[in-house]
Image: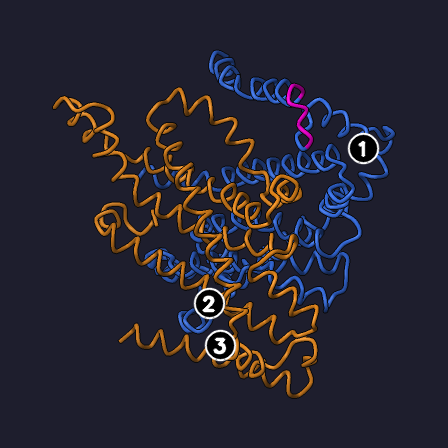
Chain colours: A blue, B orange
Amino acid sequence: MKTIVSRIAWLWILPVVLVAWEVSTRAAQAVYFPPPSVILARLHELWFSGPAAHVFLTDEAAHHLLPSLGRLVAGWAGACLVAIAAGIALGRSAVLCDVFSPLIHFFRSVPPPLLIPIFMTMTGIGTPLQLTAIVFGVSWPVLLNSLDGARYVDRQYLETCEVFGISRFRRLTRVILPAASPKIFAGLRISVALALIMMILSEFIGSTEGIGYRMLVAQSELDVPTMWTAIVLLGILGFVLNAAFLRFERHVLTWHRGARKTD
Amino acid sequence: MTNARKALRGVLGVAGFLLVMEALGRTGIIDPYLIPLASTILTGAARLLTNGEFLSQVGVTLSSCAIGLLLAVAVAVPLGMAMGTVPAVERSLRPLVEFLRPIPSLALLPLAMFLFLSGEQGKIALIVYTSCWPLLINTLYGLRDVDPLAKETLRSFGFGSYDVVRLVSLPSAAPFITTGVRIAASVALIVAVSVELVAGGDGIGVFVTQASSGNRRDVVLAATLWTGVIGLLVNSLLAKAESRLFRWHRARAGEEAL
């Protein structure tokens, strides 16, 4: 109980910053920094004042927010699954690993945004572009990390499997995947941030819907509070994704920390 | 011996990839109009090396990345030092950091386009914002790793807290900070070209936009190729510097920390 109270007490900085922001922007009449109260009001009005049947989402939110989220999650999850599978398959073979590593390292180093103009000429504007951009951005770091993780599995574990005649499938799910998982998660963590970047950028450049698109429209219309609502939404999205990811990681990797402690 | 074999396999992999792409293009399985032939892209890439326009745009992007990174180091490392050595500062600022860090930097791009009259400044501001987080987190992480015995020893010999930071904390956090720089550098390049693609100005992103609006896919891909090579070089140079400068660190912490 006491720890919870003291933990909440250490959040004092957040209200202080909000109040300081409110007071200073009102005093300075800053054009590009509307006070938080204005942003919150606009946030409610524009996105969350819809009917209860639609979970309070307005038409605007349904039109821009949901497609963004759907593409983000679908693109990210699809790319990660494929990249993890491919990475583990490659990582289990020393030859394939050596053959493909330089290529993967290279593709990992290409800033994915540069390919959006090329993707756009192939897919046109819209959902396929967003999906392609997210998939390309996410795949390489996940692939590289899964490959690395699968490559350096303790030989003793594998030899033990062999001695006990454990099937290949069980060896994969019980030994290789767990051994590679800390590395895989390191790749996944980078990929969450990259997926967000690629989502926003591909919506800036080639879309007629989505949070990024709505934000750029607000910017061109000099509608500063609406632009800020998009910043807040994207911030919340980043925060929630990050927190969910960390929780998931902690859940999955508990055994890892435990195993390390007893060493 | 094994290294030579590894390198040979890598070369074979790259050559094989290029040959397959070339064959797919020539047989028409991949429309060479959509993705130009590998040979076209490679000759295009060779030609870019003598293209003054391209080289100067690369220079613009790289220099904004470098300036942004330097500014980020100047902001994030002292802040990390303050947070890492004074627990009250850390606990007060931590919630703020946890709220600001996940905001995707590109979400701030429209705001930056308002705030900064020159696109160059806006770009650098976003690079600073993005690069600060890995630097800050790595500095904090490094300071947690400082040997308490060394600090206590210095204190008992009458050194002040400034000297403790200078002589013990900073050197032992240095490898982590360099890792932070390496991570920040790769993100900085991504953010820089993104800003150039959206907001224009100067840089590789602008070069690519112009090439693609002239429907020169070969030039777009050749420029992308060089950018990938630059990213690869910067990353491996920094990694090499890391392992050379901090050999003692690797010996102590093992491969894992890197």
- Horizontal relation, residue B188 to residue A152: left or right: right
Q: Residue at x 53, y 17 (%)?
A: A12
Q: Residue at x 82, y 30 (%)?
A: A56
Amino acid type shown at disc 3: Thr
Circle 2: is it few (<14), some (14-19), or many (20+) Cα within 10 Å?
some
- Horizontal relation, residue B253 to residue A218: left or right: left
The answer to whether A220 is drawn above or below residue A128 in the figure is above
The answer to whether B158 is drawn above or below residue A143 in the figure is above
Extent of the magenta region: A26-31
Residue B44 spot, x, y in % from top left = 55, 79
Amino acid type shown at disc 1: Leu
Residue under label 2, please give it. B229
Q: Toward the viewer: B92 or B73?
A: B73
Residues at marks 3 and 1 on the same chain: no
Looking at this view, name the residue that lies furthest to the bottom. B27
- Determine the image quadrant of residue A123: bottom right
Residue B84 spot, x, y in % from top left = 35, 29
Chain letter for mark 3, please: B
